[in-house]
Image (cartoon, rainbow, N blue to C red):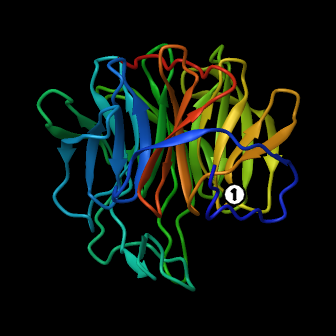
Amino acid sequence: MATTGFEAKGTAGAVVDLPYRVVAEGLAFPEGPVALADGSVLVVEVRGPRVTRITPDGARETVGEWDRVTTAGPNGLAIGPDGAAYVANNGGFAWYDKRGVWLPAAPGTGAGQSPEYITGSIDRLDLDTGEVSVVYTACGRWRLCGPNDLVFDASGGMWFTDHGKVRAHDEDRVGVFYATTDGSFARRAIFPLMGPNGIGLSPDGAVLYVAETPTGRLWAWDITGPGRVDHRSKRCLANTLGHFDSLAVEADGTVVVAALGEGLCVVRPDGEISYVPVPGPLATNVCWGGEDLRTAYVTEAAEGLLLAYEWPRPGLRLAYNR
Protein backbone atom coordinates (compact mmCIF):
# COMPACT_ATOMS: atom_id res chain seq x y z
CA MET A 1 0.00 0.00 0.00
CA ALA A 2 1.07 3.57 -0.61
CA THR A 3 2.47 5.39 2.38
CA THR A 4 2.81 8.90 0.96
CA GLY A 5 3.37 11.43 3.72
CA PHE A 6 4.66 8.95 6.29
CA GLU A 7 7.61 10.60 7.95
CA ALA A 8 9.14 8.87 10.96
CA LYS A 9 10.71 11.44 13.29
CA GLY A 10 13.28 9.36 15.05
CA THR A 11 10.71 7.34 16.99
CA ALA A 12 11.71 3.80 17.94
CA GLY A 13 9.33 1.04 16.90
CA ALA A 14 8.78 -1.34 14.00
CA VAL A 15 6.78 -0.15 10.99
CA VAL A 16 3.93 -2.51 10.08
CA ASP A 17 2.09 -2.00 6.79
CA LEU A 18 -1.59 -3.01 6.83
CA PRO A 19 -4.08 -3.17 3.94
CA TYR A 20 -6.51 -0.26 3.70
CA ARG A 21 -9.06 1.32 1.40
CA VAL A 22 -10.19 4.91 0.95
CA VAL A 23 -13.82 5.26 2.08
CA ALA A 24 -14.18 9.00 1.42
CA GLU A 25 -12.01 11.91 0.39
CA GLY A 26 -12.33 15.67 0.10
CA LEU A 27 -13.45 16.08 3.73
CA ALA A 28 -12.81 19.41 5.49
CA PHE A 29 -10.24 18.42 8.15
CA PRO A 30 -11.98 15.23 9.38
CA GLU A 31 -11.64 13.93 12.93
CA GLY A 32 -13.71 12.07 15.54
CA PRO A 33 -14.90 8.99 13.59
CA VAL A 34 -17.66 6.88 15.14
CA ALA A 35 -18.68 3.63 13.42
CA LEU A 36 -22.41 2.86 13.62
CA ALA A 37 -24.17 -0.51 13.55
CA ASP A 38 -25.64 0.11 10.07
CA GLY A 39 -22.13 0.27 8.57
CA SER A 40 -21.99 4.04 8.24
CA VAL A 41 -19.40 6.21 9.96
CA LEU A 42 -19.90 9.61 11.54
CA VAL A 43 -17.03 12.09 11.28
CA VAL A 44 -16.64 15.68 12.36
CA GLU A 45 -15.38 18.07 9.70
CA VAL A 46 -13.62 20.63 11.86
CA ARG A 47 -13.38 23.20 9.06
CA GLY A 48 -16.99 22.48 8.00
CA PRO A 49 -18.01 23.01 10.72
CA ARG A 50 -20.32 19.98 10.63
CA VAL A 51 -20.89 16.32 11.44
CA THR A 52 -21.16 14.07 8.40
CA ARG A 53 -22.48 10.53 7.99
CA ILE A 54 -20.55 8.47 5.43
CA THR A 55 -22.05 5.24 4.08
CA PRO A 56 -19.93 2.20 3.11
CA ASP A 57 -20.05 3.25 -0.56
CA GLY A 58 -18.70 6.72 0.26
CA ALA A 59 -21.95 8.68 0.03
CA ARG A 60 -22.25 11.43 2.62
CA GLU A 61 -24.97 13.30 4.44
CA THR A 62 -24.73 16.29 6.80
CA VAL A 63 -26.43 15.40 10.09
CA GLY A 64 -25.54 18.53 12.06
CA GLU A 65 -23.75 21.81 11.47
CA TRP A 66 -22.63 24.98 13.18
CA ASP A 67 -22.91 28.52 11.82
CA ARG A 68 -19.33 29.76 11.49
CA VAL A 69 -15.95 28.07 11.25
CA THR A 70 -14.30 30.93 13.18
CA THR A 71 -16.48 30.45 16.28
CA ALA A 72 -17.16 26.69 16.20
CA GLY A 73 -15.02 23.65 15.65
CA PRO A 74 -16.55 20.22 16.22
CA ASN A 75 -13.45 18.24 17.18
CA GLY A 76 -14.35 15.03 19.03
CA LEU A 77 -17.52 12.93 18.88
CA ALA A 78 -19.06 10.18 21.00
CA ILE A 79 -22.50 8.59 21.33
CA GLY A 80 -24.05 9.17 24.76
CA PRO A 81 -26.43 7.01 26.80
CA ASP A 82 -29.45 8.86 25.33
CA GLY A 83 -28.44 8.00 21.75
CA ALA A 84 -27.42 11.56 20.91
CA ALA A 85 -23.95 12.52 19.72
CA TYR A 86 -21.90 14.62 22.12
CA VAL A 87 -19.35 16.91 20.54
CA ALA A 88 -16.17 18.47 21.91
CA ASN A 89 -16.40 21.92 20.29
CA ASN A 90 -13.02 23.68 20.25
CA GLY A 91 -14.56 27.11 19.63
CA GLY A 92 -13.18 27.55 16.12
CA PHE A 93 -9.79 28.19 14.54
CA ALA A 94 -8.11 30.78 12.37
CA TRP A 95 -7.34 28.65 9.31
CA TYR A 96 -4.19 28.98 7.18
CA ASP A 97 -3.58 27.77 3.65
CA LYS A 98 -0.17 26.11 3.46
CA ARG A 99 0.53 25.10 -0.13
CA GLY A 100 -3.06 24.05 -0.70
CA VAL A 101 -3.57 22.39 2.70
CA TRP A 102 -5.74 24.14 5.28
CA LEU A 103 -4.19 24.01 8.76
CA PRO A 104 -5.54 25.26 12.11
CA ALA A 105 -2.25 26.85 13.18
CA ALA A 106 -0.21 29.76 11.89
CA PRO A 107 3.16 28.85 10.36
CA GLY A 108 5.96 29.85 12.69
CA THR A 109 3.97 30.57 15.87
CA GLY A 110 1.43 27.73 15.94
CA ALA A 111 -1.26 30.26 16.85
CA GLY A 112 -4.73 29.03 16.01
CA GLN A 113 -7.22 31.10 18.00
CA SER A 114 -9.61 32.96 15.74
CA PRO A 115 -10.03 36.72 16.31
CA GLU A 116 -13.78 35.98 16.58
CA TYR A 117 -13.35 33.16 19.10
CA ILE A 118 -15.86 33.22 21.97
CA THR A 119 -15.57 29.97 23.91
CA GLY A 120 -15.17 26.24 23.71
CA SER A 121 -18.05 23.97 24.70
CA ILE A 122 -19.50 20.51 24.99
CA ASP A 123 -22.47 20.28 22.62
CA ARG A 124 -25.27 17.79 22.11
CA LEU A 125 -26.30 16.81 18.56
CA ASP A 126 -29.63 15.07 18.01
CA LEU A 127 -28.82 12.63 15.19
CA ASP A 128 -32.47 12.42 14.14
CA THR A 129 -33.30 16.14 13.93
CA GLY A 130 -29.86 17.74 13.52
CA GLU A 131 -30.52 20.07 16.45
CA VAL A 132 -27.37 21.28 18.22
CA SER A 133 -27.53 22.49 21.81
CA VAL A 134 -24.79 23.64 24.19
CA VAL A 135 -24.40 21.58 27.37
CA TYR A 136 -21.31 23.15 28.98
CA THR A 137 -19.13 26.21 28.38
CA ALA A 138 -17.50 26.06 31.81
CA CYS A 139 -16.81 23.77 34.72
CA GLY A 140 -17.47 25.83 37.80
CA ARG A 141 -15.08 28.77 37.63
CA TRP A 142 -13.00 27.20 34.86
CA ARG A 143 -13.99 28.23 31.34
CA LEU A 144 -13.74 25.58 28.63
CA CYS A 145 -11.10 26.85 26.22
CA GLY A 146 -10.91 24.24 23.45
CA PRO A 147 -12.48 20.85 24.20
CA ASN A 148 -10.93 18.25 21.93
CA ASP A 149 -12.06 14.68 22.53
CA LEU A 150 -14.36 12.69 24.80
CA VAL A 151 -15.29 9.18 25.90
CA PHE A 152 -18.22 7.80 27.92
CA ASP A 153 -17.92 5.41 30.83
CA ALA A 154 -20.38 2.65 31.78
CA SER A 155 -22.23 4.93 34.21
CA GLY A 156 -23.07 7.43 31.46
CA GLY A 157 -20.59 10.13 32.40
CA MET A 158 -18.12 11.61 29.93
CA TRP A 159 -14.42 12.20 30.30
CA PHE A 160 -13.12 14.93 27.99
CA THR A 161 -9.92 16.77 27.24
CA ASP A 162 -9.54 20.52 26.90
CA HIS A 163 -6.67 21.15 24.50
CA GLY A 164 -6.89 24.92 24.99
CA LYS A 165 -6.04 27.66 22.53
CA VAL A 166 -2.63 28.76 21.32
CA ARG A 167 -1.87 32.40 20.57
CA ALA A 168 1.29 33.98 19.18
CA HIS A 169 2.86 34.59 22.60
CA ASP A 170 0.92 32.47 25.09
CA GLU A 171 -1.43 29.53 25.44
CA ASP A 172 -4.04 28.17 27.85
CA ARG A 173 -3.26 25.94 30.82
CA VAL A 174 -5.59 23.01 30.43
CA GLY A 175 -6.53 19.53 31.62
CA VAL A 176 -9.11 16.74 31.72
CA PHE A 177 -12.74 17.08 32.85
CA TYR A 178 -15.62 14.77 33.74
CA ALA A 179 -19.29 15.63 33.30
CA THR A 180 -22.82 14.28 33.09
CA THR A 181 -24.90 14.74 29.95
CA ASP A 182 -27.71 16.72 31.59
CA GLY A 183 -25.55 19.77 32.29
CA SER A 184 -25.87 19.41 36.07
CA PHE A 185 -22.38 18.24 37.04
CA ALA A 186 -18.85 18.82 35.77
CA ARG A 187 -15.52 18.63 37.56
CA ARG A 188 -11.91 19.19 36.63
CA ALA A 189 -10.25 15.83 37.15
CA ILE A 190 -6.63 16.33 36.03
CA PHE A 191 -4.63 19.57 35.87
CA PRO A 192 -2.34 20.76 34.40
CA LEU A 193 -1.43 18.93 31.20
CA MET A 194 0.38 19.98 28.02
CA GLY A 195 -2.17 20.06 25.19
CA PRO A 196 -4.22 16.96 26.14
CA ASN A 197 -5.90 15.52 23.06
CA GLY A 198 -6.97 11.88 22.74
CA ILE A 199 -8.73 10.15 25.62
CA GLY A 200 -9.89 6.59 26.24
CA LEU A 201 -10.70 3.92 28.80
CA SER A 202 -9.29 0.45 29.40
CA PRO A 203 -11.56 -2.53 28.62
CA ASP A 204 -12.50 -2.89 32.30
CA GLY A 205 -13.06 0.86 32.68
CA ALA A 206 -10.46 1.06 35.45
CA VAL A 207 -7.74 3.02 33.62
CA LEU A 208 -7.90 6.40 31.87
CA TYR A 209 -5.59 7.08 28.92
CA VAL A 210 -4.71 10.60 27.70
CA ALA A 211 -2.43 11.59 24.83
CA GLU A 212 -0.60 14.92 24.91
CA THR A 213 0.00 16.53 21.51
CA PRO A 214 3.13 18.68 21.96
CA THR A 215 5.03 16.23 24.17
CA GLY A 216 4.17 13.05 22.25
CA ARG A 217 3.37 11.31 25.52
CA LEU A 218 0.69 8.76 26.34
CA TRP A 219 -0.34 8.86 30.01
CA ALA A 220 -2.38 6.48 32.16
CA TRP A 221 -4.12 6.90 35.54
CA ASP A 222 -6.07 4.46 37.69
CA ILE A 223 -9.71 5.54 38.07
CA THR A 224 -11.05 5.59 41.63
CA GLY A 225 -14.63 6.70 40.87
CA PRO A 226 -16.69 8.76 38.41
CA GLY A 227 -14.51 11.71 37.47
CA ARG A 228 -11.75 10.80 39.90
CA VAL A 229 -8.29 9.31 39.41
CA ASP A 230 -5.46 8.31 41.70
CA HIS A 231 -2.90 10.98 40.81
CA ARG A 232 -0.13 8.89 42.36
CA SER A 233 -0.77 6.20 39.74
CA LYS A 234 0.17 8.47 36.81
CA ARG A 235 2.51 6.66 34.41
CA CYS A 236 3.87 7.27 30.92
CA LEU A 237 3.18 4.44 28.45
CA ALA A 238 4.87 6.04 25.44
CA ASN A 239 7.19 9.02 24.98
CA THR A 240 7.96 9.92 21.37
CA LEU A 241 9.70 12.65 19.41
CA GLY A 242 6.50 13.28 17.43
CA HIS A 243 3.09 14.70 18.27
CA PHE A 244 0.06 12.70 19.36
CA ASP A 245 -3.56 13.34 18.43
CA SER A 246 -6.54 11.13 19.32
CA LEU A 247 -6.59 7.47 20.40
CA ALA A 248 -8.64 4.30 20.52
CA VAL A 249 -8.35 1.15 22.64
CA GLU A 250 -8.41 -2.45 21.47
CA ALA A 251 -10.29 -5.26 23.21
CA ASP A 252 -7.05 -6.59 24.73
CA GLY A 253 -6.02 -3.18 26.11
CA THR A 254 -3.68 -2.13 23.30
CA VAL A 255 -3.79 1.65 22.85
CA VAL A 256 -3.61 3.01 19.29
CA VAL A 257 -2.69 6.69 19.04
CA ALA A 258 -2.87 8.80 15.89
CA ALA A 259 0.64 10.23 15.63
CA LEU A 260 0.87 13.35 13.48
CA GLY A 261 3.43 12.79 10.73
CA GLU A 262 3.99 9.18 11.76
CA GLY A 263 0.74 7.28 11.18
CA LEU A 264 -0.69 5.17 14.01
CA CYS A 265 1.37 4.45 17.13
CA VAL A 266 0.40 1.04 18.52
CA VAL A 267 1.22 0.59 22.23
CA ARG A 268 0.78 -3.02 23.31
CA PRO A 269 0.02 -4.07 26.91
CA ASP A 270 3.59 -5.43 27.26
CA GLY A 271 5.02 -2.03 26.25
CA GLU A 272 6.02 -2.96 22.71
CA ILE A 273 5.52 -0.04 20.28
CA SER A 274 5.02 -0.21 16.51
CA TYR A 275 3.75 2.13 13.81
CA VAL A 276 1.22 1.68 11.01
CA PRO A 277 1.79 4.08 8.10
CA VAL A 278 -1.08 6.30 6.96
CA PRO A 279 -1.22 8.08 3.57
CA GLY A 280 -0.92 11.81 4.17
CA PRO A 281 0.87 13.69 6.95
CA LEU A 282 -1.91 14.19 9.51
CA ALA A 283 -3.49 11.03 10.88
CA THR A 284 -5.81 12.43 13.53
CA ASN A 285 -8.25 9.80 14.84
CA VAL A 286 -9.12 6.11 14.83
CA CYS A 287 -12.18 4.05 15.77
CA TRP A 288 -13.32 0.43 15.37
CA GLY A 289 -16.16 -0.89 13.23
CA GLY A 290 -17.42 -3.89 11.32
CA GLU A 291 -19.19 -6.92 12.77
CA ASP A 292 -16.04 -8.21 14.47
CA LEU A 293 -14.61 -4.73 15.22
CA ARG A 294 -11.55 -5.57 13.11
CA THR A 295 -11.94 -2.57 10.83
CA ALA A 296 -10.00 0.48 11.94
CA TYR A 297 -11.50 3.68 10.55
CA VAL A 298 -8.84 6.38 10.42
CA THR A 299 -9.18 10.07 9.59
CA GLU A 300 -6.37 11.87 7.76
CA ALA A 301 -7.04 15.59 8.08
CA ALA A 302 -4.58 17.24 5.69
CA GLU A 303 -5.79 15.33 2.62
CA GLY A 304 -9.36 14.99 3.93
CA LEU A 305 -9.54 11.19 3.97
CA LEU A 306 -11.55 8.54 5.77
CA LEU A 307 -9.66 5.24 5.54
CA ALA A 308 -10.61 1.68 6.51
CA TYR A 309 -7.79 -0.63 7.64
CA GLU A 310 -7.89 -4.39 8.04
CA TRP A 311 -6.83 -4.60 11.69
CA PRO A 312 -5.16 -7.72 13.15
CA ARG A 313 -7.12 -7.65 16.44
CA PRO A 314 -10.62 -6.57 17.49
CA GLY A 315 -11.18 -3.11 18.86
CA LEU A 316 -13.00 -2.30 22.08
CA ARG A 317 -16.76 -1.78 21.72
CA LEU A 318 -17.71 1.59 23.16
CA ALA A 319 -20.48 1.84 25.73
CA TYR A 320 -23.30 3.45 23.74
CA ASN A 321 -22.56 3.13 20.02
CA ARG A 322 -25.67 2.38 18.04
Which residue occupies the foreground of this view, 187 or 59? 59
In percent of width and height, residue 136 lies at: 32, 42
Residue drawn where x is 34% and y is 74% of the image: 114
The type of residue carrying mark 1 is: Glu
Residue drawn where x is 21% and y is 29% of the image: 127
* Occupied quadrant, residue 215: bottom right
Residue 113 is at least partly visible in this image: yes
Residue 90 in the image: above or below residue 229: below
Q: Which residue is mark 1?
A: 262
In percent of width and height, residue 227 lies at: 55, 28
Number of marks present in the image shown: 1
Residue 37 in the image: above or below residue 62: above
In percent of width and height, residue 162 lies at: 49, 50
Residue 54 in the image: above or below residue 89: above
Element assignment for label 1: loop
In percent of width and height, residue 81 lies at: 35, 17
Residue drawn where x is 57% and y is 86% of the image: 108
Answer few, some or many: residues within 10 Å of disc 1's Cα (few below 14, many 20 plus, some between 14 and 19): many
Residue 196 in the image: above or below residue 93: above
Q: Quadrant of the C terminus?
A: top left
Q: Is residue 66 left or right of residue 273?
A: left
Residue drawn where x is 18% and y is 40% of the image: 132
Farthest residue toward the front? 1
Residue 144 is at least partly visible in this image: no
* Occupied quadrant, residue 70: bottom left
